[in-house]
Amino acid sequence: RLVTDGSWNPREGRLLEFFVKLGDVVVDAGANLGGFAVPLARAVGPTGVVHAFEPFRHLFQLLTANVALNGLLNVHTHHSALGDETAEIPRPSPDLTKVSNPAKMHVTDELASTLLVAYGSSETIHVRTLDSFNLERVDLIKIDVESMEMPMLRGARDTIQRCRPVLYVEDSEGDKLPQELTSVMKFLIPMGYSCIDPGVGHADGGGALTSLLCVREELS
């Protein structure tokens, strides 16, 4: 998609841009090359901030380069995974010399999909909780962390309760819907959130939409 259109998943990008305004603060967990961080940084403007987290070194370097090439001074790139503890984990690196899907690189041992993942040498992944960053304001959290969404959410509990952001979460248990609630929904609903699959009801089944949209009940 990046090669043919110059953007990554523009439908989801437009959806997320609807929920932010100038001056907002965004957390992009699993930023990869910056396919969402870059347009969201433009949407929040120079008075806003995007915190983009990418744990794999080569992808983090490309993310940071992408931010610099786009002249975005309001993006903070963080070379870290987000989980529910502080840890260092050995993981295979993405092999960018082969045709592959580096967006599917994963920190967790159990992964819903390994489609087109090419591995190279090993590296040490640094894991922190989002709460440990003590962010004063967060308006939107986009989560695409390849089956690590529950540890990431547990490590962001205080931030979510305090800031009440909109959450857009790639849910590895999405195939359970609508018959039963996923672990993400069971975590967020008691915190006063309503979650929907924004692709439901579209003629094409939602197309490129792959995540749950969760908003605090007073907005739903």
Image (tube, grey):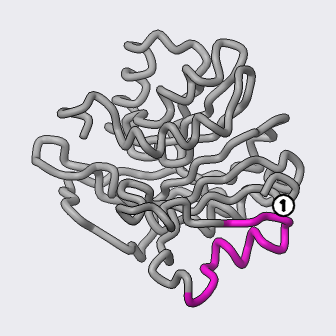
Which quarter of the figure has residue 21? top right
Question: Residue at the location (76% across, 39% down)?
Answer: 138
The residue sitting at 75% across, 66% down in the picture is: 194
185 sits left or right of 108 in the view: right
Q: Quick check: can you spot residue 19?
A: yes
What percent of the width, then of the height, locates residue 220?
78, 57
The kind of residue on which mark 1 rests is Glu
Picture coordinates of residue 181 (x, y %)? 63, 83
- In magenta stretch: residue 194: yes
Percent position of residue 110, x then y: 42, 76
| Residue 199 magenta | no
| Residue 199 image position (x, y, % from top left) | 48, 61
CA neighbours of label 1 inside 10 A, class few (<14), some (14 to 19), many (20+): few
Identity of the residue drawn at 65% across and 57% down: 86
- Number of marks in the image? 1
Q: Is 89 in front, or is 203?
A: 203
Question: Outermost residue, left direction?
Answer: 98
Above or below for 78 versus 99: above
Q: Nearer the viewer, residue 87 or 181?
A: 181
The residue that disc 1 covers is 217
Magenta region: which residues? 179-195
Q: Is residue 13 above or below residue 159?
A: above
Query: Taking 204 as reference, is 199 left or right?
Result: right
| Residue at the bottom extreme of this rendering | 179
**Nearer to us in this view, 40 or 67:** 40
